[in-house]
């Protein structure tokens, strides 16, 4: 079994900051990409940021310069530091990880349960 457990969501005023964390646990041989997605009411889930196993990052245009993704490979944890939050950042944020469970296993994608981020104007 593999689990991704997110934490750090909440309610914040516009201009404020939040830090999300997502820890992977269970039968894990290696983790490739780790990322954050979000889904606002009535909208499709969208990629927010992704970090590779070597630390390369990529961001959605809407969050560049405001959000920073990072990971701690020893802790199997990915973080999303969100600064200068805007009301349009309000969404459920999901953690995603591409995980290999054994040395000869294929890579599979796993999702966390989601954490709510609400930004008031």
Image: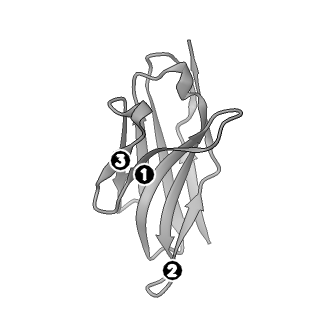
Where is 66 relative to 58, above or below?
above
The answer to whether residue 12 is visible is no
Which callout, 1 or 2, points at the residue further toward the start of the chain?
1
Q: Earlier in the sequence, mark 3 or mark 2?
A: 3
Q: Nearer the viewer, residue 20 or 91?
A: 91
The residues bearing labels 1 and 2 have C-alpha atoms spaced at a distance of 21 Å
Give me the C-alpha separation between circle 3 and circle 2: 24 Å
Residue sticking out furthest to the bottom: 104
Tell me the crowding category of disc 2: few under 14, some 14 to 19, or many 20 or more residues within 10 angstroms, Cα based. few
Q: Nearer the viewer, mark 3 or mark 1?
A: 3
Label 2, on which residue?
106
Label 1 residue SS? strand
Counting other residues with Cα less than 10 Å from the Cα at mark 1, is it few (<14), some (14-19), or many (20 or more)?
many
Residue 40, image x and y in percent? 64, 34
Residue under the image location 29 percent in, 54 percent down: 56
User: Among all residues in the image, which is located at the extreme top?
Assistant: 121
Asked whether 25 or 112 is in front, the reply is 112
Q: Nearer the viewer, mark 1 or mark 2?
A: 2
Q: Which mark is residue 78?
A: 1
Is residue 96 visible in the rendered image? The answer is yes
Measured from the top left, where is residue 3 in percent x and y?
Answer: 59, 62
Query: Which residue occupies 40% across, 59% down?
Result: 75
- SS class of the residue under badge 3? strand
Along the horizontal axis of the image, is 105 left or right of 54?
A: right
Dot 3 alpha-carbon crowd within 10 angstroms: few under 14, some 14 to 19, many 20 or more: some
Could you tell me which secondary element the residue under label 2 belongs to? loop
Q: Which residue is mark 3?
A: 58
């Amino acid at each position: 079994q593999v689990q991704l457990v997110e934490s750090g969501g909440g309610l914040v005023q516009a201009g404020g900051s939040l830090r999300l964390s997502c820890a992977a646990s269970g039968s894990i041989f290696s983790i490739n990409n780790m990322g954050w997605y979000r889904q606002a009411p009535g909208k499709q889930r969208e990629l927010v940021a992704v970090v590779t196993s070597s630390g390369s990052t990529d961001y959605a245009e809407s969050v560049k310069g405001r959000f920073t993704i990072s990971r701690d490979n020893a802790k199997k944890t990915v973080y999303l530091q969100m600064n200068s939050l805007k009301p349009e950042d309000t969404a459920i944020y999901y953690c995603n990880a591409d995980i290999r469970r054994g040395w000869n296993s294929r890579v599979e994608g796993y999702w966390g349960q989601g954490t709510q981020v609400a930004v008031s104007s």
